[in-house]
Image (cartoon, helix red, strand yellow):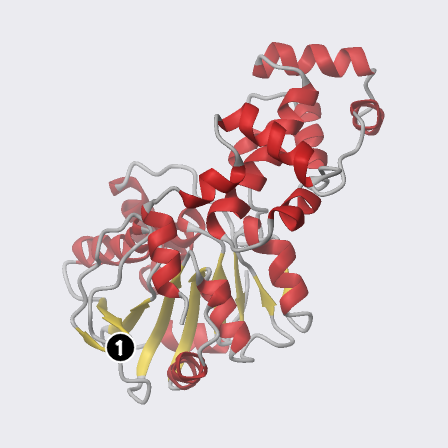
Amino acid sequence: MTQSKALLTICELQRPIGVDFLIVPGCSLLTLASAVEPLRAANRQAGRIVFNWRCVSIDGLPPLTSSGIAWPVTAKHEASSRCDVFALVAGFGAAQMTDRKLIAHIYRAARNATLAIAIESGAWLLARAGLLDEHRAATHWEDFEDFAAAFPNVNLRPDRYIIDGRYITTSGSSPTFDLMVDLVRRVLGHPAALDVASSFVHDDLRAAGDPQVNVTLGDANHDPRLVRSIRIMETHVDAPVSIAAIAKRVSMSTRGLEQLFERQLGQTPGAYFLSLRLAAARRLVNDTRLSMTDIASRTGFSSESSFSRAFSRQFGLPPSASRKQPSATQAVAAVSRP
């Protein structure tokens, strides 16, 4: 079990635990709900106010979430106000948020809290404030390489969530739910935590140190060799390896691997690998301002033209047209950048 003096201090309080959720534009509704709802359910199970939370924003206005829906807040956040738990909820656009006033605000707020939680992309902002240097941290798997390059002094790990001293970081909505249930367990005990999880019909709680599992891996009924093959593909999106090489690494023949993919996924390993790379490329096209040449390079295409052809075949339009299409995510990401 991960030990943290700050977390122990919070859990031993004989009064309601105050939680300030600072919501940054671009965060996910599902992540927000995963953070708040377990605390609400814990209060219901306990029959009293155990967690006393409020949602706030930098300017006091309802921030737009990634779906374009505004999340209501109760107040403008004051960085100088003290609280038990400062929970920073961020998503799309967090990596581009470099405004000094914003970072200074987050630095002061985190320092004025007993415990600071960076939820999903919140780790970008805590790290930019210098608070995660020499600490272990987690972030969403899509951001892993860019985060590691941006903050070499942070010990980035592929865990679902990490507790390290005064700082907790989560990698997404499901890990955030698991963290909050874990917090309930530490405060109210194991039976209460099980009741909270059961109230959401959630029977697959994961530990903090469990690795993030991409949706591409499918369910637990898949052959372990298939899972290992897909892991290899996911870690070589920028520099694709041959199917024969992947088959050798999972102790199979090339033909055997092809049959396994056809049987369990209904497509060849080559087609599956290409779809993974193009899915990663589409995220970069729609969620970043990287040039098409850079995106092609990052997703293993030999040229921008070959990338554009493959993208058009897969999605029915060229990458430049995809970037121009309006979407809630793109709109939020745009307004999130200072």
The residue most toward the bottom is: 80
Specify whether 173 is left or right of 227: left
Q: Quadrant of residue 238?
A: top right
Residue at image coords 46%, 60%:
121
In the rendered image, the quadrant that contains the N terminus is bottom right
Specify whether 206 is left or right of 297: left
Residue 322 in sight from this viewpoint = yes
Residue 218 in sight from this viewpoint = no
Q: Secondary structure at mark 1?
A: loop
Towards the viewer: 116 or 243:
243
Q: Position of residue 107 (x, y in %)?
A: 44, 83
Q: Amino acid at mark 1?
A: Gln
Residue at image coords 25%, 53%:
37
In the rendered image, the quadrant that contains the C terminus is bottom left
Residue at image coords 28%, 72%:
20
Residue at image coords 56%, 49%:
141
Rendered position, 207 above or below 245: below
Specify whether 18 is left or right of 222: left
Rendered position, 192 above or below 301: below
Q: Position of residue 304 (x, y in %)?
A: 67, 40
Q: Position of residue 77 (x, y in %)?
A: 26, 79
Rendered position, 61 above or below 292: below
Towards the viewer: 294 or 61:
294
Which residue corresponds to mark 1? 14
Specify whether 271 is left or right of 242: left
- How many residues crowd around disc 1 within 10 Å: few (fewer than 14), some, or many (20 or more)? few
